[in-house]
Image (tube, grey):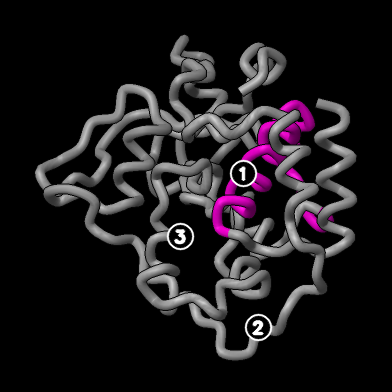
Amino acid sequence: MSGATALRMPRVYARRTAVFAATAALAAAGALITAPAAEAAPPTPVSAATARTYLGELTVKAEGSLTGYSRDKFPHWITQSGTCNTREVVLKRDGTNVTTDSSCAATSGSWYSAYDGATWTASSDVDIDHIVPLAEAWRSGASAWTTPQRQGFANDLTRPQLIAVTDNVNQSKGDKDPAKWLPSLTSYRCTYARMWVDVKHYYSLTVDSAEKSTLQSILNGC
């Protein structure tokens, strides 16, 4: 997260319902939540300079068809350890003061969404976004992978591929690439582009011309 993002006063939410009323109540009670520390974040992506190099190495190709695609072909969320699945691990990693029950479900904590600057105190208001969406990966080469390979991609905790964000923001992103969707917080776009290229390069996925042009523009300004 950039310094600009960390200093930005985030919008604050407690639950999806009665958003503004809840925010006012929290503020009145002196319990307004601030953005968590920067360490609550996915793995650090490659630098902008390395991302520019990686982007130049990616194959430029028109997006393939979604024929045959199903999210079931990217099994997730799988068990990572004990009773904890991938979603629960990311919620714990990306949140602040997260507590869990015996089944590893988050029972309290706060989650700062770097896409829109919102902070949530209910895990149900948080989605785990695939930086490179599953359908985008399918159109970019994953259709030729085995199911175990797709499972690894969908649950990758080593690369900057998974991030906890506001649920409806994740839903608005859908399977769009950076030419069609970018985080509303412009200060996060450099990090987002670095993450996107890092993941696509590692998995040898293709980029289309509009996607590459957008990424180049962002990375040149980092």
**Residue under numbered circle 1:** 198
* Residue 121 visible, this angle: yes
Which x, y percent locates residue 82? 12, 48
Question: Which amino acid type corresponds to the residue marked 1 in the rendered image?
Answer: Asp
Q: In the rendered image, which quarter contains the C terminus?
A: top right
Image-based side of 176 in relation to 118, left or right? right
**Residue under numbered circle 3:** 153
Q: Quadrant of residue 208?
A: bottom right
Closer to the camera in the image, 10 or 145: 145
Please tell me whether mark 2 or mark 3 is closer to you in this view: 3
Magenta region, residue range = 179-203
Label 2 secondary element: loop
Question: Which amino acid type corresponds to the residue marked 3 in the rendered image?
Answer: Phe
Question: Which amino acid type corresponds to the residue marked 2 in the rendered image?
Answer: Leu
Residue neighbourhood size for the residue with mark 2, other residues' Cα within 10 Å, grouped as few (<14), some (14–19), many (≥20): few
Residue in the picture at 50% in, 23% down: 25
Residue in the picture at 68% in, 57% down: 172
Q: Is residue 196 magenta?
A: yes
Q: In the rendered image, which quarter contains the N terminus?
A: top right
Most frequent secondary structure within the magenta stretch: helix
Q: Is residue 195 above or below residue 8?
A: below
Image-based side of 73 in relation to 58, left or right? left
Please tell me whether mark 2 or mark 1 is closer to you in this view: 1
Q: CA distance from mark 2 to mark 3?
A: 17 Å
**Residue under numbered circle 2:** 66
Q: Quadrant of residue 118?
A: top right
